[in-house]
Image (cartoon, rainbow, N blue to C red):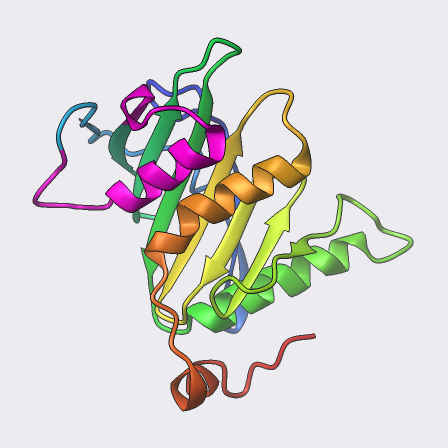
């Protein structure tokens, strides 16, 4: 499916507790779409000034060169499309923000199950790459071109559409846009959110 009016196609894999579910999510929006290329939405601030500014810094373009629009993903969660206009072509990051119980577990299982697809002799797609220091858990999925992360309360999936860019630059851009969405706890609270679901 394609994001309405944006031209971004993405598929999101979500592992729900006790069952593996494959849902098409981040790349498509529902029928309701609010264009907000100027000003900022007050009723549903899913688009963040800090994320837009981070994208501008990452791409070395003025903040005014980046537009943003709100839509709803196929997972029913709100998402913001950031689009930078550049002489060498547009760059898009679609940030889907899902608030759910067991967010850490869902992200952990998503990463583990994707890694299992890579296990010989299957190797159906490239294995996810861990992105350290981002939330409680984060990985980049080369096949889907998105970064999934969590602070234990919400799941952020940042899909990148950037023709010709290296994987390293795409990861850096997705990370920059994601950071403002995360409110990562530390110490005992972080351990509680991940309790019973160790990495690895």
Q: Position of residue 197 (x, y in %)?
A: 56, 81
Q: Residue furthest left?
A: 43
Residue 48 shows in the view: no
Tell me the quadrant of the picture where the C terminus can be found.
Answer: bottom right
**Nearer-the-camera pick, 164 or 79:** 164
**Nearer-the-camera pick, 167 or 59:** 59
Residue at 66 percent across and 40 percent down: it is: 168
Q: Which stretch is magenta?
A: 40-67
Residue 35 in magenta?
Answer: no
Residue at 34 percent across and 43 percent down: it is: 51
Q: Quadrant of residue 142?
A: top right
Q: Residue furthest top?
A: 87
Q: Is residue 178 left or right of residue 30?
A: right
Residue 192 shows in the view: yes
User: How many discs appear?
Assistant: 0
Q: Position of residue 97 (x, y in %)?
A: 34, 51
Q: Position of residue 53 (x, y in %)?
A: 33, 38
Q: Position of residue 82 (x, y in %)?
A: 35, 31
**Nearer-the-camera pick, 13 or 146:** 146
Residue 62 in magenta?
Answer: yes
Residue at 42 percent across and 80 percent down: it is: 186
Q: Residue furthest right?
A: 121
Q: Is residue 116 left or right of residue 98?
A: right
Residue at 41 percent across and 73 percent down: it is: 102
């Amino acid at each position: 499916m394609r994001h309405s009016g944006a031209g971004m196609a993405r598929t999101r894999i979500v592992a729900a507790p006790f069952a593996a579910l494959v849902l098409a999510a981040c790349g498509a929006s529902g029928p309701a779409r609010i264009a907000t290329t100027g000003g900022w939405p007050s009723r549903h601030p899913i688009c963040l000034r800090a994320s837009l500014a981070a994208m501008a810094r990452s791409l070395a373009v003025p903040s005014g060169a980046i537009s943003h629009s709100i839509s709803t993903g196929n997972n029913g969660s709100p998402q913001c499309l950031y689009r930078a206009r550049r002489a060498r072509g547009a760059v898009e990051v679609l940030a889907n923000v899902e608030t759910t119980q067991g967010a850490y577990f869902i992200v952990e299982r998503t990463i583990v199950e994707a890694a299992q697809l890579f296990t010989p002799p299957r190797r159906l797609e490239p294995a996810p790459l861990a992105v350290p220091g981002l939330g409680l858990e984060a990985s980049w999925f080369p096949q889907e071109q998105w970064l999934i992360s969590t602070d234990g309360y919400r799941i952020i999936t940042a899909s990148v559409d950037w023709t010709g860019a290296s994987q390293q630059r795409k990861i850096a851009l997705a990370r920059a846009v994601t950071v403002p969405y995360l409110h990562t706890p530390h110490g005992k609270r972080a351990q509680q959110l991940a309790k019973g679901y160790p990495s690895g």
